[in-house]
């Protein structure tokens, strides 16, 4: 059955007014979320059909992406050829850090990574076109130019994660496996919130893409290494400021039986879902604030 669009849910922003579809008190939150997900799915499917028109190019580019991202782990392997442990962590344990952070970042990049191009769309006037479509603006921006080529990073990270789990037998009770799945889901949400939150800055500061990347890709690079090798102030900053420590550091400390560098209560090691929920809420509020401030290019 064909899906229909409700013009009352337009994501457009009238000059000096509220976004049409961002605050509909008559609709429950669940219905608005389902509508946003459906809109994203339909737009992403359109872009996927366009990409598969050139199948050879798609598969070659995807394979190249997988190969390039694999070089990051090769660097870690070469590092461990000269040292048995890094900050007290073995190579398989660091592999857990690498796999979880890479998967969370990679999947978030697949789902919402297109939002990082928001500044370019604002300058060119392309954002005005997206805002006039009968769908939530954020869904349209995140799905714009959706590509499965970005799956190279999460696929490669899953392979490393599987190898690391295999190299650490006896540590994986049902509770630990559940905690691992929980941190992967929560980490994806946290990185997705960072993508959106960083992109919102571009409503006021158009050239902020690299600033955003320092928290997304830079954050994932930070999380590949044990927290003990970093200054205590930095670890505190990515725990109570940006919630990056909840992506993998704190949960993996519980799984591996290691104390966290800050000596926090054990409840923090299970708090990734709460951190993800708060991050998503903050990103949503920031997006709404950015839309209210946006006045269009007049194109």
Image (cartoon, helix red, strand yellow):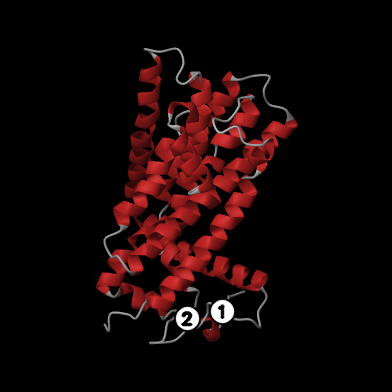
Q: Looking at this view, is 37 or 206 the one in front?
A: 206
Q: Looking at this view, is 195 or 245 the one in front?
A: 245
User: 10 Å neighbourhood of mark 1: few (<14), some, or many (≥20)?
Assistant: few
Work out whether 116 lies above or below 289.
above
Question: Which residue is identified by label 1?
Answer: 23
Q: Report whether residue 37 is seen.
A: yes
User: 10 Å neighbourhood of mark 2: few (<14), some, or many (≥20)?
Assistant: many
Q: Which mark is residue 19?
A: 2
The image quadrant where one finds the C terminus is bottom left
Between the residue at mark 2 and the residue at mark 1, the CA separation in whole angstroms equals: 8 Å
Q: Looking at this view, is 211 or 217 the one in front?
A: 211
Work out whether 268 lies above or below 196.
above
**Residues at discs 2 and 1 in contact (Cβ within 8 Å):** yes
* Residue 147 coordinates in the image, percent (x, y): 40, 54
User: Where is residue 258, by image quadrant?
Assistant: top right
The image quadrant where one finds the N terminus is bottom right
Work out whether 99 lies above or below 297.
above
Local secondary structure at mark 2 = loop
User: Which residue does the image show at 33% across and 42% down from the upper left?
Assistant: 60
User: Where is residue 219, by image quadrant?
Assistant: top left
* Residue 232 coordinates in the image, percent (x, y): 47, 33
Q: Report whether residue 159 is seen.
A: no
Most extreme residue toward the right is 174
User: Which residue does the image show at 45% across and 20% down from the upper left?
Assistant: 86
User: Which residue does the image show at 41% across and 62% down from the upper left?
Assistant: 47
């Amino acid at each position: 059955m064909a899906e229909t669009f409700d013009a009352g849910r337009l994501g457009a922003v009238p000059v000096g007014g509220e976004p049409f579809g961002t605050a509909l008190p008559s609709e429950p939150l669940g219905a608005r979320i389902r509508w946003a997900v459906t809109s994203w799915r339909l737009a992403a499917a359109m872009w996927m059909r366009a990409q598969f028109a050139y199948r050879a190019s798609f598969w070659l580019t995807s394979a190249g992406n997988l190969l390039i991202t694999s070089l990051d782990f090769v660097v870690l392997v070469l590092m461990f050829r000269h040292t048995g442990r890094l900050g007290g962590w073995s190579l398989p344990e660091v592999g857990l850090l690498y796999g979880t952070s890479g998967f969370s970042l990679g999947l978030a990049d697949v789902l919402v990574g297109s939002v990082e191009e928001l500044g370019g769309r604002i300058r060119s006037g392309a954002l005005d076109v997206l805002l006039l479509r009968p769908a939530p603006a954020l869904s349209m921006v995140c799905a714009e130019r959706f590509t499965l080529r970005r799956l190279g990073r999460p696929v490669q990270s899953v392979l490393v994660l599987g190898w690391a789990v295999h190299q650490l037998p006896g540590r994986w009770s049902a509770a630990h496996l559940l905690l691992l799945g929980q941190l992967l889901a929560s980490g994806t949400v946290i990185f997705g919130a960072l993508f959106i939150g960083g992109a919102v800055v571009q409503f006021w500061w158009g050239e902020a893409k690299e600033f955003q990347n320092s928290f997304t890709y830079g954050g994932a690079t930070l999380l590949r290494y044990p927290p003990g090798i970093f200054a205590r102030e930095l670890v505190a900053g990515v725990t109570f400021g940006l919630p990056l420590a909840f992506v993998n550091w704190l949960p993996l400390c519980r799984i591996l039986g290691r104390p966290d560098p800050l000596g926090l209560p054990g409840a923090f090691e299970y708090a990734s879902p709460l951190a993800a929920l708060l991050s998503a809420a903050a990103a949503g509020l920031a997006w709404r604030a950015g839309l209210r401030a946006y006045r269009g290019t007049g194109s």
